[in-house]
Amino acid sequence: MPSVHFTPNLRRHLRVESTEVEGHTVSDALSRVFRDNPDLRSYVLDDQGRLRTHVVIYVDGRAVRDRTELGDAVGEGAEIHVMQALSGG
Amino acid sequence: MLLHLGTRKGYLALRRFARGDWRCERTAFIGDPVSQLLPDPRDGRLYAALNLGHFGVKLRVSEDGGASFTELPAPAYAKEESAAEKAPSVDLLWCLEPAGPDPGSLWCGTIPGGLFRSDDGGSSWTLNEALWNQPSRERWFGGGYPHPGIHSVLVAPDGNRVVAGVSCGGVWISEDAGESWRVRTEGMFAEYMPPEMREDPAIQDPHRLAWCDGDRRRIWCQHHNGFFRSDDGGETWTGLEVPPSSFGFAVAAHPGDPQVAWSVPLVKDECRVPVDRRMVVARTRDGGASWEPVGRGLPEGDSFAVVYRHGLDAHPGEAVLAMATTTGALWISEDLGDSWDLVTAELAPVYCARFDAARPA
C-alpha cells in the first residue's frame, strides 16, 4: 500500500502521523487519510479541494502535476510526502 | 482593562495596572499570523482568526479567556463543479463581529469578498448569498490584496441593520439582517479611477468604517481617496479635509459623542509613511468640521509607522485609545488622544487591537 507522510510542521497545529492507505491516485490516498483525520483536510486542500498554493506533494520524489484534482497515479508501495513549498516563505 | 492584540507573530493580551503600565498577561499562537480577534461581550468567548500561510485560514475559540483554544471550522466556499481553477477559496478572515443579541450569532468578512454568518458560535458557517450574488460584485477588485475583501461590519444591537465596508466594492447596507442589501456611496469618489468610473459605487474603496454607538447615524469612513462622514447612517457621504493628510487606513469613533473621531494620516497611497515621518493622530471634536493633529509623546520624526485598519480602537466605555503599528509599537492614550504612552516597541507588525469590554447596547 502507498505510504503517506506529512511535514512535521503540521504537528504544531494538529495530530498527524505517517500512515499506509489504499489508493491508486493521490486523491484516493488523501481521502482515506482525511476520513480518519477530517481536520487535516483544510490544512492541505483549499475550499475547492485543490492543493493549497504553498503546499507541495511528492510521489516517489516527483512533485505532483495535477494540483486541482490530485489525479496523479500512485503505485503499490509509493511514498507520498506532503510538504510545505518554500514559495510560502 | 484588557487589550487583545493580533500580530503577525501571534496573539497577546495586555492588562492595565496603571497609566502607561500595561503588562502582557497571555500569549498564544506564537509564530503564527493572527488576522482578527473577537472578544465577545455576550458570552465571554474569545475568537481568533489565523492565517497560517501554507496551511490556510483557521478559526479558534477560547472558553477560558485565551488560556486554551479549540479549533472551529473556518468559513469556506462550497465546492464548485465547474471552473475549478477560478472557484473561490477563503484567503483571509478579515473581520469578526457579533451579528445581534443572540450569543453565537456572528458575521465574518473575508477575502475574496464573501460575508459568512454563523448562528452556532462558529461551529458552522453560511455564505451570505444575497451579497455574494449582487451583480455589481463582478466589478469589485482587490485593494492591497489580489482579491476584494470585507473588513468592516457594523451591526445594530438588534442585529437587523448591518453596514458592511468592502475594499474595493463600496458600502453595503442591510435593514433585514443580511437578507437584502443596497450599496450606498453617494458623495464618495475615487480620483485614481478613469473619470467615468470615479463615482461608481462598486469600485469605492472604504478602508475602514466606524460608527458612534451613541448615535449610529454618524459613520466615519477612512477611504482610499480621502476621509468621509455620514450623518444618515451611511445613506450619503461628505468628503472632509483631514490635515496633515486625508489618506490612511484606521479610523475610530468615540463611543458616546458623535462629534469625536480619530484617524492616523499617512502621506498618500503611493507613499505610506507618516507625513514628514512625524507620527500624529488627527482628531475632530466638532463632527469633522475641523481637525487637529494630536499626539504628545509620539515620535516627532524618523517614523515609518503605519496603523492598519484594525489597529486603532476606542474603548467602548472609557476614554482610552489603543493604537498599534506595523513597526511593532503599542501606544495608549487616556486623554482622547492628546498624549500617548508607549507600552512596547517590540511587537511584530500588528493587524488588530481590540479592547475587551461589554459594548453598550
Image (spheres, coloured by chain):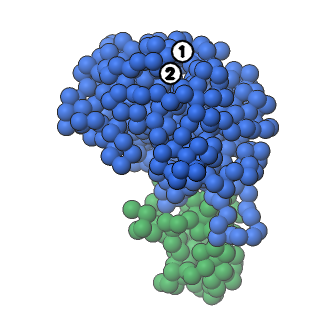
Chain colours: A green, B blue
| Horizontal side, residue A31 vs residue B259: left or right | right
Mark 2 vs mark 1, CA separation in Å? 7 Å
User: The disc labelled 2 sits on which kind of residue?
Assistant: Ala
State yes or no: discs 2 and 1 in contact (Cβ < 8 Å). yes
| Horizontal side, residue A47 vs residue B284: left or right | right
Q: Residue at x 74, y 52 (%)?
A: B135
The local crowd at label 1, few if under 14, some if 14 to 19, many if 20 or more residues have their Cα within 10 Å, is many
| Horizontal side, residue B331 vs residue A2: left or right | left
**Which of the numbered marks, if any, corresponds to residue B258?**
1
- As helix, strand or loop, the secondary structure at mark 2 comes to strand
Residue B45 picture quarter: top right
Residue pushed farthest front? B195
Residue B210 picture quarter: top right
The quarter of the picture where the N terminus of chain B appears is top left
In the rendered image, which residue does mark 2 sit on? B253
**Which of the numbered marks, if any, corresponds to residue A6?**
none
Nearer to us in this view, B17 or B89 = B89
Q: Residue at x 46, y 13 (%)?
A: B286
Q: Chain of mark 2?
A: B
Looking at the image, residue A39 lies above or below residue B167: below
Number of marks in picture: 2
Looking at the image, residue B169 lies above or below residue B280: below
Which mark is in front, 2 or 1?
1
- As helix, strand or loop, the secondary structure at mark 1 comes to loop
